[in-house]
Amino acid sequence: MPTINATNSGTGLDVRGLVDQLVAAEGGPVSSRLDRKEVNIQEGLTAIGTFKGALLDFQASLAPLRKENAFKSINAISSNEEKFTVSAADNAVLGSYNIEISQLAQSQKLKSQAFDSEFDTIGSGTISIEFGKINNATNSFDVNSTIPTQHIEIDEENGSLRGIQQAINEANAGVRGSIINDGTGYRLILNSEKSGIENSLRISISDDDVNDEDLFGLSLLAYNPVVTAGEEDGIAVGKNLEQAAQAKNALFSIDGISISNSKNEITDSIPGLTLSLKKITEDSFESFKIEKETTRIKQSIETFVSSYNELMTTVSSLTGFDSESGRAGPLSGDSAIRGIIDQIRRRLSTSFNGINENLTSLSIIGIDSSRDGSLSLDDFKLDKALENHANEIAHLFAAAVSTSDAKIRVTSEKIPATDGVFNITIDQIPASASFSGRVLANYPENIFDVPEKIQFSIDDITTGELKLLPRSFESGKAFAAELERVINQDANLKRNDKTVSVTFINNALKIVSNSIGLASGVSIISIGQNLSSLTGLATGKGQSGNDLKATVNGYEITGEGTKLKLEGVLSGVVIDVSGKQTGNRGQLTVTNGVASILDELTTSFLDSKGLLSARIDGYNSKIKNIDKERENLVRKLEVSEQRYLKQFSNLDAMLGKMRSTSNFLAEKLSTLPGARRN
């Protein structure tokens, strides 16, 4: 308040003091009322902040429960991790197993003869590396068609032992070369990067010295594992490398069932299980077990119950009545807070009939409401539910979309708002486009005199003119593997991420697009006449693919490849269908569990535009109104002060005049005759 100076005319009247007292008397009660009002509002604002903090803590307890993955923890325990380890995915079958390991998988290793120097010139030509296994019954080498043959060109510049080793490594052909001096000389060591008997090596040589199977030039590196020694000289020509380590499969048994695998990392023996074999068990059994990991889940549920009770305790202190102090809480009677708590409590009684067969509510797993509104937890009921119905507990808490068919996977994160169980019917399985050649009477061991040319259209992508180099093929299977390699190496297909698979079955070639559905396609645009007659392939368009068709929740849906985008109340859900079975394929289950619902609910309350923010804005608005009332009071008191100053100044002036007049009259009267005598 600005200071206003008042002039005292000498009457002795305390104008400033009187004005200040009057102004204080006028403004004091109003100011006190505003102070009390602000204190109450500040208490309410602080209480809202306290409630918001408690609600945030409660929401944090929901995080470990609102996702289905939180309920899929599985422990895999090995009895002897020095000999093997085990890990399990969420779909692993629970149980205990015995295991016996009699042999570990091993890759083949070949070594050359000894040379005087690693820089000795060996020769030039082409090294062809193939993977496969020896067929002892027919004494033949069966090529592994899943691994393309690799051709490595060796010229005069890299024709030394060191140059050949580097060329093999740079080709990334699945074989690693190294040079070792074993005391007798320098040897080239070729080590297959893949273990297992089906990944044995065959090294074929196209030697520039014309003879591919002698003991000179690049032929020194030839290795045909099925060649036998001649009767006269005892030399197995064409088998010029020596086997330093034999390719072996891992041999083991699980619960008495014998298993052979090309790797020591076993992923396909028991669904969802990975075994890493390290040592043989030496005629003794070891064991492993797969069990549900429930400790963490139980702790999360206990934290949820505890956090809920802490929230209720906070709410009670903020909205209740303290009989000892006779005071109500700062949020007593606040309808917004009461509405929030009522909504949270209602969600706890959500029924899961039709979703779960056994656990249809929280009370069945031991979570019950007490008279004071808090929750209690029965450990016995919870442990029993975790042991027998862990998957159903996930439905009680988490938001999830799941399927009963292991070959139908949910690939989207969308969780529909509508809970329920929906039937899935596959009306048509998806198929890839393919091109089949004519059936051949037999497949000759062909040698192309010149490169043969062929051009394709794969999924509407036209390849360049592909060349098949002159070479012999011992079977249609071997030719199919080479044709597949040549097609998939095309630059246009690589740019568009397109590939094919080529097989030779029942004396006919079949080229299949690795894309699925009507969008896939295989056509031969051009082919040389000689290649056409040898392979049974001809120009033309192959068989079209099929799209996936299904009926889900009454909606007929056409898929894209193996994926289905669902419709209606399931809109936004995408499933991936594998397997060849049509007809009924089980159910799709949608659940919005308690933790998921409460998380969404609390998020809406805590949102910047939510109910709590509105309440906080309301309190802040009231504080601003009080500030305005104070400003108005100041202005009002300033006006009153000016009025009082004016009034008392006038009074003081008038009294001053009256005193002056009195003094004047007294002086004059004193001069009258007789006045001195009197």
Image (cartoon, rainbow, N blue to C red):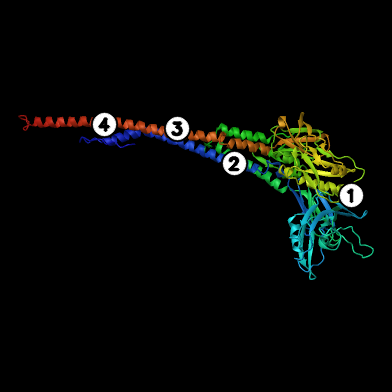
Crowding near the residue tagged with mark 2, few <14, some 14–19, many ≥20 C-alpha atoms within 10 Å: some
Q: Mark 3 to mark 2: distance in Å?
A: 30 Å
Residue 270 visible? The answer is no
* Viewer-side label of 2, 4: 2
Amino acid type assigned to the residue bearing label 3 in the image: Asn
Q: Mark 1 to mark 4: distance in Å?
A: 131 Å
Amino acid type assigned to the residue bearing label 1 in the image: Glu
Q: Mark 1 to mark 3: distance in Å?
A: 99 Å
The answer to which of marks 2 and 4 sits earlier in the sequence is 2
The percent coordinates of residue 559 (x first, y second) are 76, 34
Secondary structure under tag 2 reads helix
* Viewer-side label of 2, 1: 1
Q: Which residue is mark 4?
A: 648
Nearer the observer, 500 or 639: 500
Crowding near the residue tagged with mark 1, few <14, some 14–19, many ≥20 C-alpha atoms within 10 Å: some
Nearer the observer, 42 or 366: 42
The numbered mark at residue 445 is 1
